[in-house]
Amino acid sequence: MIQSFQLILYTSTIVLILANSRGVNARRCGLGCHSFILPSHTHHAKGNPQRLQHTNTIRALVAPSSTFASQKVSHHPAIVNDPLPTKMNRNSLALRGGASVLGSAGAGGMMLGPLSNFFKSYPYVVAFTICATKASAADWISQFAEAKKGNNGNSGNNKSTTSKRKSGLSLRRNLAFLCYGGVYQGIGQNYIYNNLFSALFGKSTSMATVFTKVLVDMLVVIPTICLPVAYLIKAAIFKYSPAEAARRYIVDIKENGLLVISWIVWAPAQALSFAFIPEHYRIPFMACVSFFWLIMVSSISGRAG
């Protein structure tokens, strides 16, 4: 009887070693190595040192020795420790989770991860840098376009063309847009849209919340903060009075359609931003939109000199 029992144990040991080497889950194969063989044999091994030794041998082969080093062999089938399936399930879940993450994110996810963390950690630094660079580039494009247009109308004289090209590019004007982009569009808008609006209207992306934020932005923020700040910064750099800045602002609204153009550009852009764009990507997204908007603003505000 003892020899037959030993033969069964050795046979089971070989089968378990083969199954474990091929990565087969003992539960799914129907072997039930850890929940069927071990509990029953552990129970019958009570009082029989030889059987208990064979049982411990199987457990040591089935799972890493370190797993069982800190656990005592239970002599009751209802409380037998079962670390192997837990470990196997944990490993399989980790494999599946890792594969899904790599499959969905890929190289782009690996690149966007650190970038996203940097945007979250330094929101104002990111906002200032991106928006200042964008505003300066947009104004340079507008100035080059204006200079080229003026040169085409005076192509008969090379000297006048050269002088007009030089006079058509204004470093002070570009500095005004750089300051406006960094200070207001970067730092200011990050506070207004990501902090103040969230405190006033919440962070919900429901249609009612998004509509409220867009409406307040179009009727309050843009006409009373967004556009006037640009003209005040330009007045400070070009050294003319705030009253003159206000006069030019009103002229551009009435005669050049500045406010209407702003609504046409920003109403759909802000609806998309508040509904779908995460907070730490909102200012970079707005910077992409305002790049083209600032080209128009630069052209309109530059008409008055």
Image: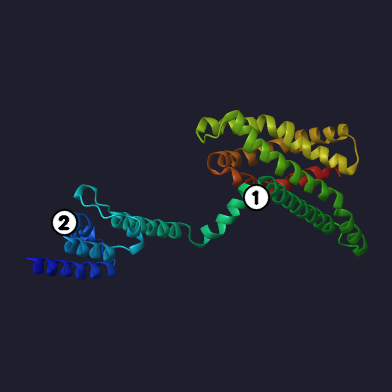
**Amino acid at circle 2:** Gly
Q: Which residue is mark 1?
A: 288
The disc at residue 47 is: 2
Q: Quadrant of residue 253?
A: top right
Q: Secondary structure at mark 2?
A: loop
Left/right placement of residue 131 relative to residue 271 reads right
Residue found at x 18% / y 61%? 49
**Which one is nearer the viewer's eye here, 227 or 168?**
227
Q: Is residue 22 visible?
A: no
Packing grade of label 1 (10 A; few <14, some 14-19, many >=20) is: few
Residue found at x 68% / y 39%? 189
Q: Residue 137: where, in percent of width, then height?
A: 75, 54
Left/right placement of residue 122 relative to residue 1 reads right
Left/right placement of residue 288 relative to residue 108 reads right
| Cα gap from disc 1 to disc 2, whole angstroms | 78 Å
**Which one is nearer the viewer's eye here, 135 or 259?**
135
Q: Is residue 123 above or below residue 26?
A: above
